Amino acid sequence: MKTLWVFWRRFTRNRAAAGAAVVLVAVLAIAGFGRLLYRTDPFEMVGQPFQPPLGAFALGTDVAGRDILAGIIHGAGVSLFIAVVATLCATVTGVTLGALAGYYGGLLDDVLMRSTEFFLTIPSFLLAVVLVAIFSPSVLTITVAIAVVSWPSVARLARGEFIAHRDRDYVNACRAIGTPEWRIILVHILPNALPPIIVVASLMVATSILTESGLSFLGLGDPNVVSWGYMIGVARSVLRVAWWMAAIPGFMILVTVLAINLVGEGLNDALNPRLTGR
């Protein structure tokens, strides 16, 4: 409990991060509970097309007469779900490969890092577009594609952390008393290597939201679900006559990504021992 209190005190010293955390909680509440309170189907044509906000519908209607507010609420859940799941998959994959490469070194390190560098030579968004186009757009393929293009950076970071820790005194003491290597990796080194990985993972969620939005904007989103990127893609052809159709979901993406980035900065301040005296 004392550790949590110290972490919370350090985190709240960054007022921007604390405010962003409140905004992020509000977005998560919209994603989790919004559709229980606002049950309109985002694909249902409920009114005339091109109705502006603050009229019969709070945020207006789109080109097909669908309620934009319903799309914002349902899109929050889809965009965050894809981003969080893709980040979790990428983090687990990257930490696993990076830990093995950093701890054992040698040939295993060379093979894993050369494979990682191969993925880093390909533009991540272009690779995501190719993967989704090949396997047909769906929530599953978009999530997998984002995870595939995201794990190399985590692997390199984890490798560096494990290299920094593998020869320290506490690790040598564990080897001296016969501690199994898997226990050294999971129980002793990994908790000490996690803080920077947590920060990078939090920022990766924001990047994943942008990637999913870009894919949906290009028409590579799942046609059976509504996301914020999908809504912007639908509105791009009528941007001059109905700016709110793209501006509202674009604003939600902006606010969410900015909040996640500020929270990530706050986590870095709270978890980085070098900033304890700040």
Image (cartoon, rainbow, N blue to C red):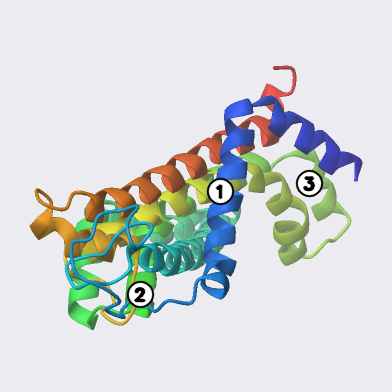
Give the residue type that dot 2 points to: Pro
Q: Residue under circle 2?
A: 42
Callout 1: 10 Å neighbours few (<14), some, many (20+)? some
Can you say which quadrant of the picture contains the C terminus? top right
Looking at the image, can residue 127 be seen? Answer: no
Furthest residue in direction top, as rendered: 278
**Residue 218 visible here:** yes
CA distance for labels 3 and 1 = 42 Å
Name the amino acid, label 1.
Leu
Task: Classify mark 3: helix, strand or loop.
Answer: helix
Q: Residues within 10 Å of mark 3 (few under 14, many from 20)?
A: some
Question: Which residue is under mark 1?
Answer: 24
Mark whose residue sits in front, 2 or 1: 2
| Residue identifier under label 3 | 172
**Is 42 on the left or on the right of 3, as rendered?**
left
Of the numbered discs 3 and 1, the one sitting upstream in the chain is 1
